Image (cartoon, rainbow, N blue to C red):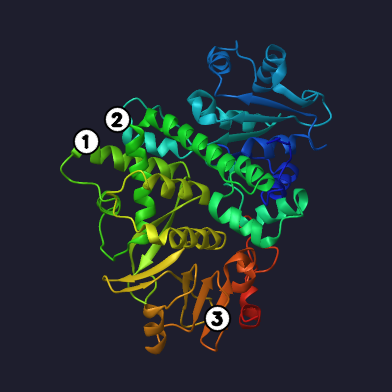
Amino acid sequence: MTKWNCFFERDIFSELLKWAKTSTKGLFLRGPRQVGKTSVLLKLGETDLFSGCLYIDLRSPEIRAWWEHDKNGLGWYERFQQFAKTFKASVVFGEPFREENKPLVILDEIQESPKMFNSIRDIVNEQKVKLAATGSYLGIAEFENRFSSIGQPYFMPVGNVQPLEMGTLTYREALRACNQFMPNLSKTEVFERYFQFGGYPAVVKDWMQSDGSKDCIATLQHIYAVLQREAQRYIQEPLPQSVWDLMFVGVAQQIDRKDDILQNHDQEITYKLRIPDTNAVSRDNKISMMYWMLSCDLLISGIVTNNLNKLDNIVKRSYYFADQGLLFLALTNSTLYPSLPINRGNMSGILAENYVALSFKEYMVPLSYVKGNTEEIDFLYQSPTDTKPDALEVKFSGGKTVSSEKALSDGKVKRIVKIQRDFEQSTDTTIIYPMEDMDKFGEFLGYSKEHNRYVFPDLDIFQAYGGSRNG
């Protein structure tokens, strides 16, 4: 299949423009590998806000070595000038060191160089360049302090940088990309492909161009292999792919199986992923792997309550994949391990719940309800103007919502919202919300149409709450 170059418009770009125009701070742009961080910053570097753009790839051993050597007391501006002359290909736009505007300097994958990481404050304080640092594993600083005996200290320059997080394309961003580049795809087709293969830009390009899965799976497998390889640096012992497969399947499994057991974090992860206590080294490695996935933004965390009258009674966390494609790959890999206790008949249901959790994450931390082994509500939502929450149930193909219906009859929830694929008539107490309309979910909750994860609502946003949600 022919590949083509295109830049997907991202919600974060307006915030990057605002930073470039008004902020005196540096920028930390964090997020997993291959989500488009470098592309969006290079696009920013093309604008006339800068004299040019200097790109420094700290994954390169040669480039890292160059920065390790003392520069004879040169200021940072002069060091960047010298670097640009030495590595001419790193000047990607314009003439960075003209006097009219500051250059944009991009330090890509900055966690690879503790020296450069710890120099951010000095570079920003010099105020001669606009500095943007990207990191796939900026969370690794905390991770290394916890697990690695060879990890080097990273000093976070609090007050000198503006942090922003970037993930794979949201469903809304994927729809916008298709409207721009593949307008022949219907919304249903976009939903079906995003629901299964997710929002990694390279994967989106694959599924935009083909209705087959071969290219998408191959790209996802490549991303998965990169994650495995890079994680090995932070694990105590080499781990085979089967262990990684089991970990990824374990996260998918806990989406499907819930309980309200309260445990400390390590115990919780051990229990959730069904890690046996008989092998301490293996257990520690798997806990390390889970922390690594959380630190690197491969997973998102939700919270669980066991009290519908007191939603802040939090008993544990829940975990979801930060991208639908990674979850799909985990479920696909689960078929290689018949002994795993995952409900293969509910794979669509697991994908659906993760998909809705990602939509929730745009607005708030996903909140679920579990009590014992019999009561379970997928998600709860309560507006500031209501005294009772709504019970949100995710049903890929429809079905009963026993726990929510009991909570409704007991007067503990205001109403039931069923997010599902199949059409069904709404009633006064049960609203049917189409799964492929999750791009408008914020409006359904009462947020403005312009709201995204980078733009927060006004304080009076819920004044029209009832009217905006009932349509």
Would you name the residue on which mark 1 appears? 281
Picture quarter containing residue 228? top left
Q: Nearer the viewer, mark 3 or mark 2?
A: 3
Q: Residue at x 58, y 76 (%)?
A: 423
Badge number at residue 471: none
Q: CA distance from mark 3 to mark 2?
A: 50 Å
Would you name the residue on which mark 3 appears? 431
Q: Residues within 10 Å of mark 2 (few under 14, many from 20)?
A: some
Marks 2 and 1, the one that precedes in the sequence: 2
Tag 2's secondary structure? loop
- Residue 80, image x, y percentages: 67, 20
Q: CA distance from mark 2 to mark 1?
A: 8 Å
Picture quarter containing residue 123? top right
**Nearer-the-camera pick, 407 or 49:** 407
How many numbered marks appear? 3
Q: Amino acid at mark 2?
A: Gln
Marks 1 and 3, the one that precedes in the sequence: 1
**Nearer-the-camera pick, 109 or 173:** 173
Q: Are marks 2 and 1 in contact (CB under 8 Å)?
A: yes
Q: Residue at x 47, y 37 (%)?
A: 224
Q: Is residue 235 above or below residue 32?
A: above
Which quadrant of the rendered structure holds the N terminus? top right
**Nearer-the-camera pick, 160 or 312:** 312
Q: Residues within 10 Å of mark 1 (few under 14, many from 20)?
A: few
Q: Nearer the viewer, mark 1 or mark 3?
A: 3
Marks 3 and 2, the one that precedes in the sequence: 2
Q: Amino acid at mark 3?
A: Ile
Q: Amino acid at mark 1?
A: Val
Would you name the residue on which mark 2 appears? 236
Q: Is residue 210 left or right of residue 119?
A: right
Picture quarter containing residue 343? bottom left
Q: CA distance from mark 1 to mark 3?
A: 49 Å
